[in-house]
Amino acid sequence: MNIQTILLFVSFIATVIVGMIVVPILKKKHLGSDVRKDGPQSHLKKSGTPIMGGIIMILVVTCILAFYLKDYPVLVLPMMAILGFGFIGFIDDFKKLVLKDPEGISPKIKMLGLILITAIILGLYLFVFDLGTTIIIPFVDQPISLGIPLFIIFAAFILLGTTNAVNLTDGLDGLATGVVAIIMTFFTLVALKQQNTEMVIFASSMVGSCIGFLLFNIHPAKVFMGDTGSLALGGAVAIISLILKMPLYLAIVALVCIIDTVSVILQVLYFKATKGKRLFKMAPFHHHLELSGYKETTVVMIFWIITVICCVIAYFI
């Protein structure tokens, strides 16, 4: 049995076991969510659902990466992405749920924390592991090499943009978890094609853990991942795209995340420009679809299918 199959199975089982332990603890501690009153009415019944379930995936994948770290030191990069970005999300969730501060950490402090983690990751990427500044361009056979200053700016945008995009996509039961599982399946296949064992280990572990978490996160969700999980998953997607030299492919495989992010930006700009009018019934876009009459499970399935199609297209171009 090949390593990716073994790790997918191991991470899946481990996530289910850890989830069966952690979810009841979160529920017992009453670490539940407050649902937006201006959102879909069907979401009101979700109030009180435990949050911070992202801890489950972080624990499982980090332990697997730590097991292989001695033989594959570059795995410290995805470990840093998951733990670092996940920690920023954890602080935000902790303030909201445990300290009962509905605002969480301020946007400025949160962004400062994300930038700090990004700086550490890029420092390791360029100056410790010397992974270079080459990127592959879709539809073009010849990769290009960016200068270090330009690459730092570009890579920082990818890391920060992807973490926030996945965070915004995490709004429906199983949506972000399923989308990331599909994207990481794509990167598993790419890593196999490139014979990159380190990223095969990382990506297949992520796929198994996401699928395992879906058992708790699928509609009706028994637990939400919170910012703890969504920022960690965003960091995972971003760092593997950089290591495999395919950050531009995120424009294809993460299309639904981009749509959700752009919808939020457009909503804010339109609201300000028209002094209070809304472009969408609600942003991100998946909530607009719900308020337009689509069932939550239907929206999730549509976004999953779109992601599968985009990943197939990206793999063969």
Image (tube, rainbow, N blue to C red):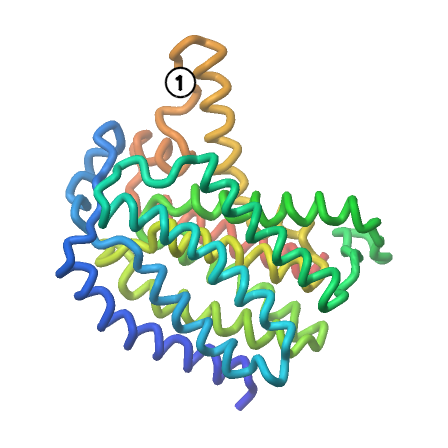
Q: Seen in the image, is 105 located left or right of residue 35? A: right
Q: Nearer the viewer, residue 48 or 261?
A: 48
- The answer to whether residue 238 is left or right of residue 22 is right
Determine the residue located farthest toward the top in the rendered image: 275
Q: How many marks?
A: 1
Q: Residue extending furthest bottom?
A: 1
Residue position for label 1: 278
Q: Residue, x 27% and y 63% (percent of image)?
A: 216
Residue nearer the viewer, 177 or 31: 31
Q: Give the x, y percent position of residue 302.
A: 42, 47
Q: Is residue 188 above or below residue 245?
A: below
Residue 131 position, x and y percent, is 75, 65
SS for dot 1 = loop
The residue lying toward the viewer, choosing from 189 and 94, is 94
Residue at point 15%, 58% (across, down) = 29
In the image: residue 200, left or right of residue 37: right
**Image quadrant containing the C terminus:** bottom right
Considering depth in this image, is 139 or 170 the residue closer to the camera? 170
Residue 154 position in % (x across, y down): 70, 45
Image quadrant assignment for residue 136: bottom right
Q: Residue at x 25, y 57 (%)?
A: 223
Q: Which residue is drawn at the image coordinates 38% and 12% (left, top)?
A: 276
Q: Is residue 140 above or below residue 21?
A: above
Give amino acid for label 1: Arg
Q: Position of residue 114 (x, y in %)?
A: 52, 47
> Pointer 1: residues within 10 angstroms few (<14), some, or many (20+)?
some
